[in-house]
Image: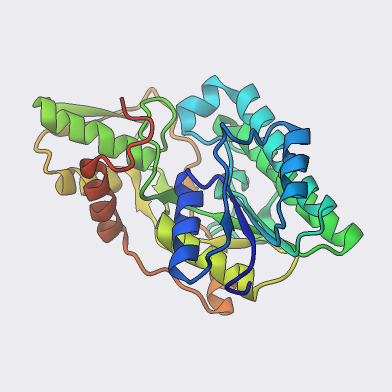
Amino acid sequence: MEPGSSIYVAGHRGMVGSAIRKKLEESGYRNIIARTSEELDLRRQQDVEDFFKSNHIEYVFLAAARVGGILANSMYPADFMYDNIMIEMNVIRAAYNNGIKRLMFIGSSCIYPRLAPQPMPEDCLLTSELEKTNEAYALAKICGLKYCEYLNRQYGTDYIVVMPTNLYGPNDNYHPENSHVLPALIRRIHEAREAGHKKVVIWGTGRPLREFMYSEDLADACIFLMNNYSGNKPVNIGTGKEISINDLALTIKRIVGYEGDLEFDNSKPDGTPRKLLDVSTLEKAGWRYKTGLEEGIRLVYADFLSGASRRGYA
């Protein structure tokens, strides 16, 4: 991408899209195109086609998606599947129809099999059963990934797919039902401290292992790959480091300054027992993460306290 390239960031108000937009601006890219969901509903095919036709777009970062944690995925599987498939197909097809140079589809490590080998290499995709608690979301993301692959094979497009690990950062979602585990823990432990509650109850056993990455590191990796990678093989983006949910909760407890107890509700689902990405492809390409987990949590908790980006907080 050249400094004057026309770049569309789909989902620019979400955690991932806003981080990509910020990093692009910091890197000297000025011709960035963005639309809110009120201005452009990506689920409406004709509206998306008209948008691409009326804007000279050269590059696309497809970060728009409907996302959520275990509870939201369990409650609204039909909505997760429909919204994500429609968004992906409409944007990718309109990009193809209008001859854009490159597109990056941002997938998710959630689409790997439940019992994938650890750390998870890119080629373990579709080798065994998906995790049931987020199956609808995973299937939708697999459709987008495969559509990019098929367009590359059939028409010679240059669309790439990245597979981020669990993310956190500014503009994260703190909704009590729809948030992921790290922002959910920040909210619940913070509120328990503020209210003087003596304990916080957390879903599951606390034993599952998870990898977490600061969103601005992800954005840096995405721009690096857009400029330096081409191929049909998806690229994992992560830290290569993991932590148990129990230890994550203890870390957040310490940073928040909460002095009560943490209690795990074993009757609630854990989700995938372990989810660590093999990031060797990314590291061989010349990129490595910069923000350690404790540093990142301190940054995001300060952002949370400022009230600057508490999406879903009411």
In this view, the residue farthest toward the front is 54
In the image, 259 versus 298, the foreground residue is 298
Residue 158 location in percent, x, y?
Answer: 77, 65
In the image, 84 versus 31, the foreground residue is 31
Q: How many marks?
A: 0
Residue 35: quadrant of the picture = top right
Q: Is residue 198 visible?
A: no
Residue 171: quadrant of the picture = top left
Residue 31 location in percent, x, y?
Answer: 57, 62
Colour scheme in use? rainbow
Q: Residue at x 22, y 44 (%)?
A: 306
Q: Is residue 304 left or right of residue 176?
A: left
Q: Is residue 14 left or right of residue 192?
A: right
Q: Is residue 9 visible?
A: yes
Quarter of the image containing the N terminus?
bottom right
Q: Residue at x 72, y 31 (%)?
A: 44
Residue 136 location in percent, x, y?
Answer: 64, 31
Q: Is residue 122 left or right of residue 19?
A: right
In the image, 246 versus 42, the foreground residue is 42
Residue 5: quadrant of the picture = bottom right
Above or below, 89 relative to 17? above
Quarter of the image containing the C terminus?
top left
Q: Is residue 46 left or right of residue 84?
A: right
Residue 299 location in percent, x, y?
Answer: 26, 55
In this view, the residue farthest toward the top is 75
Q: Residue at x 45, y 55 (%)?
A: 19
Above or below, 58 relative to 190? below
Q: Residue at x 16, y 44 (%)?
A: 256
In this view, the residue farthest toward the right is 154
